[in-house]
Image (cartoon, rainbow, N blue to C red):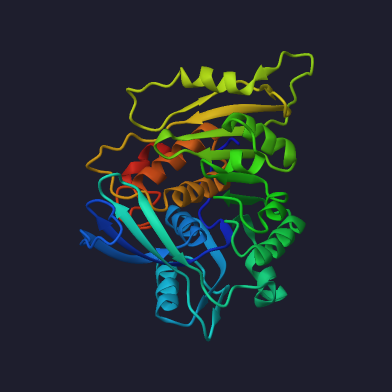
């Protein structure tokens, strides 16, 4: 990726989870049968797709969201928040009866971890809920599509239509889910949580798992695995093949060599990359590509409030970066900055920055 331009008004379509988060912070996570008081409380929209598209909207994209809620208090709150952030909710199906999705989230002030108790919406979304005319309208003029692996039957219909229209697809693979294997075959980019690559491929290490993913998924251009405070690792497939006569590089050893180049004294996100090479994963195969390490911002403990939705913020920023044709190194640093801003406030959305915010000033230069 190269050659930035401002992607204002670029349309992105997302299909997946929306919901309402009920967040309570506590001094320390309670023991069984223990009664404790929360130190703060917030009710806020949530769901991977709802969060990622809110992030994209604040950065300047024009998101449309395909999902399902019920006509209840939670559902109306979900719609109001998305609309207030500039997300087009006209493709959300509203059931006259049932319950909108919601999640109880306990944020531990001691460990800065969060525990989620999710209640799925009912009735669930089915492909018949999305008419063909509505789907075509949602995809009209779209620059990129986003899937979070939920609502898999409907998401597959959206994905196949996007493929027909040559609309690239970014998928956030949080963990293996029903229908994920069918979805991930047709996408162009993957952002995934730390455990996903090894669980999905059964590879011994993350680098080997990334090689395995690109070999199994010939359409995928890159895979990013997010690692929280440890940043991210990305494997990018390259168009320019290295001659097979060139020496292969063991992917685990290459990652170790990149790790040694990290500078612990730099607090802002940075990116370290290899050259294009033939990357070998023993027992799996070889892929021609480029390996990247992206560091996370070193947030002072007194500024770190809540990590809920940090991965969604990262994915929303990647959507923007793809639309803006950011260079890969710039994309990883940009996404890390956006995720760090989110972590400075309670909930998945409170801290999401806008493109003209001071924390993103260096990316506007």
Q: Is residue 229 above or below residue 139?
A: above
Q: Which of 146 and 258 lies nearest the eye of the viewer? A: 258
Is 280 located above or below residue 85 in the figure? above
Instruction: Name the side, left or right, on which 32 lies relative to 134.
Output: left
The number of discs equals 0
**Residue sitting at the far bottom:** 96
Residue occupying the point 23% across, 63% down: 35
Image spot of residue 163 (x, y percent): 74, 55
Left or right: 145, with 215 as reference point:
left
Determine whether, in the image, residue 322 is placed left or right of residue 285.
Answer: left
Q: Measured along the vertical axis of the image, is residue 1 above or below residue 181?
A: above
Q: Quadrant of residue 86?
A: bottom left
Q: Which residue lies furthest to the front in this view?
A: 33
Q: At x 48% / y 21%, what residue is drawn?
A: 259
Q: Residue 70's spot in the image, x, y percent?
A: 50, 79
- Position of 271 with respect to 206 (left or right) is left
Q: Position of residue 106 (x, y in %)?
A: 33, 58
């Amino acid at each position: 990726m190269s050659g930035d331009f401002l992607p204002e008004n670029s349309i992105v379509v997302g299909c997946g989870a929306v919901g309402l988060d009920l967040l309570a912070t506590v001094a320390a996570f309670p023991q069984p049968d223990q009664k404790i008081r929360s130190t703060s409380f917030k009710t806020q929209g949530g769901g991977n797709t709802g969060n990622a598209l809110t992030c994209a909207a604040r950065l300047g994209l024009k998101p449309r969201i395909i999902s399902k809620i019920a006509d209840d208090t939670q559902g109306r709150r979900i719609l109001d928040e998305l609309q207030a952030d500039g997300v087009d909710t006209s493709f959300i199906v509203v059931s006259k009866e049932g319950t909108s999705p919601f999640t109880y989230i306990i944020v531990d002030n001691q460990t800065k971890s969060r525990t989620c108790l999710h209640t799925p919406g009912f009735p669930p979304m089915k492909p018949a809920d999305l008419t063909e005319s509505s789907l075509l309208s949602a995809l009209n003029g779209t620059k990129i599509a986003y899937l979070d692996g939920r609502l898999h039957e409907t998401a597959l219909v959206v994905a196949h239509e996007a493929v027909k229209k040559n609309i690239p697809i970014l998928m956030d693979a949080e963990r293996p889910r029903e229908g994920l294997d069918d979805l991930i075959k047709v996408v162009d980019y993957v952002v995934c949580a730390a455990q996903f690559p090894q669980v999905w491929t059964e590879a011994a290490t993350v680098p080997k798992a990334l090689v395995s993913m690109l070999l199994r998924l010939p359409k995928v251009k890159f895979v990013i695995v997010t690692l929280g405070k440890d940043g991210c690792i990305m494997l990018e497939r390259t168009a320019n093949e290295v001659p097979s006569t060139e020496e292969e590089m063991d992917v685990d050893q290459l990652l170790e060599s990149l790790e040694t180049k990290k500078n612990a004294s730099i607090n802002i996100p940075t990116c370290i990359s290899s050259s294009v090479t033939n990357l070998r994963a023993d027992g799996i195969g070889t892929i021609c590509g480029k390996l990247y390490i992206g560091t996370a911002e070193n947030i002072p403990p007194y500024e770190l409030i809540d990590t809920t939705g940090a991965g969604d913020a990262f994915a929303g920023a990647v959507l923007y970066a793809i639309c803006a044709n950011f260079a890969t190194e710039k994309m990883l640093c940009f996404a890390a900055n956006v995720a760090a801003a989110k972590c400075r406030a309670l909930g998945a959305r409170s801290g999401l920055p806008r493109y003209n915010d001071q924390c993103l000033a260096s990316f506007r230069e």
